[in-house]
Image (cartoon, rainbow, N blue to C red):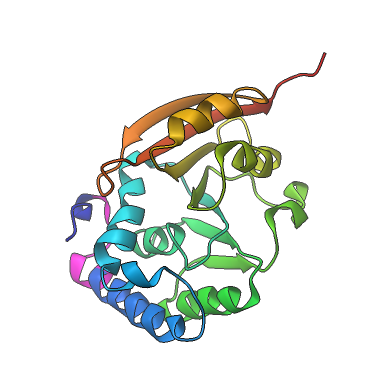
Amino acid sequence: MFPYEAYFHRPLAEVAADLESYAQLLRKWQVVQNLVSRETLDDVWTRHFADSLQVLRLLRSTDQVFLDIGSGGGFPALPLAIALKGTPAHFTLVEPNGRKVSFLRTVARELGLLVTVEGSRTDQIDSRETPVPDVITSRALASLPQLCAWMAPFFGPETRAILHKGREHVEELAESGTHWIHDVLIDRSDTDPSGVLLTLSNLREKSVR
């Protein structure tokens, strides 16, 4: 249930209690707001929590500024914020849907997480007025070329994007290569046999000649 306990910064019991509180809030709000697919709600610990927490194994000790785009029900950012609670790590979640914004803010407030929720689209945020993120995360939001377009304004020299992707990642990498340059590392997902975690760095748009 907790294969990533070695990466937690608090006792396992405290992390588990916060995750359970999150799960309860998720079930409560799911009645009025579609936060996750109904098929996965009963398997939230594996399909959503463990799937999110596997990002921990790819983080560096210096990663403190996180930007999550298209946060939806809060994955992967909120489980990561729970695991890193008590550290300087700060998470900014970007979500345009008003009800989902209310849900994310409720979870952050009730669990005392170092989280800011921006109720807008990524392309409506001025990257010049936000801290340069160490890590950008996104899960089940859009194709890689579109994600690159949304993420590029926020990229600094040391920024990395850690993205959940499915079996289509090979095609998406090829497609993104027509407009974008980036280095990429591919790690197999621990929870999805056909899934991967893509770590992108040095993201920039190709020059048009």
Highlighted magenta segment, given as a residue range: 7-15
Is residue 61 toward the left or the right of residue 133 in the image? left
In-front residue for pair 77/34: 34
Number of labelled discs?
Answer: 0
Relative to residue 175, is residue 23 depicted above or below?
below
Quick one: which residue is furthest to the top in this view? Answer: 209
In-front residue for pair 184/129: 184
Relative to residue 190, is residue 91 depicted above or below?
below
Magenta highlight on residue 12:
yes
Q: Quadrant of the C terminus?
A: top right
Relative to residue 21, is residue 163 depicted above or below?
above
Q: Quadrant of the N terminus?
A: bottom left
For the point 46% across and 57% down, the residue is 88
**Image quadrant of residue 157?**
top right
Is residue 126 toward the left or the right of residue 16 in the image? right
Instruction: Give how far across and how far down residue 63 sits, in percent.
Output: 46, 44
For the point 56% across and 38% down, the residue is 144
Magenta highlight on residue 185:
no
Instruction: Give how far across and how far down residue 186 sits, in percent.
Output: 38, 30
Is residue 149 toward the left or the right of residue 105 in the image? right
Relative to residue 200, is residue 122 depicted above or below?
below
Is residue 117 toward the left or the right of residue 167 in the image? right
In-front residue for pair 142/66: 142
Instruction: Give how far across and how far down residue 108 sits, in percent.
Output: 48, 74
**Image quadrant of residue 101?**
bottom right
For the point 46% across and 41% down, the residue is 162
Instruction: Give how far across and how far down residue 64 sits, in percent.
Output: 48, 49
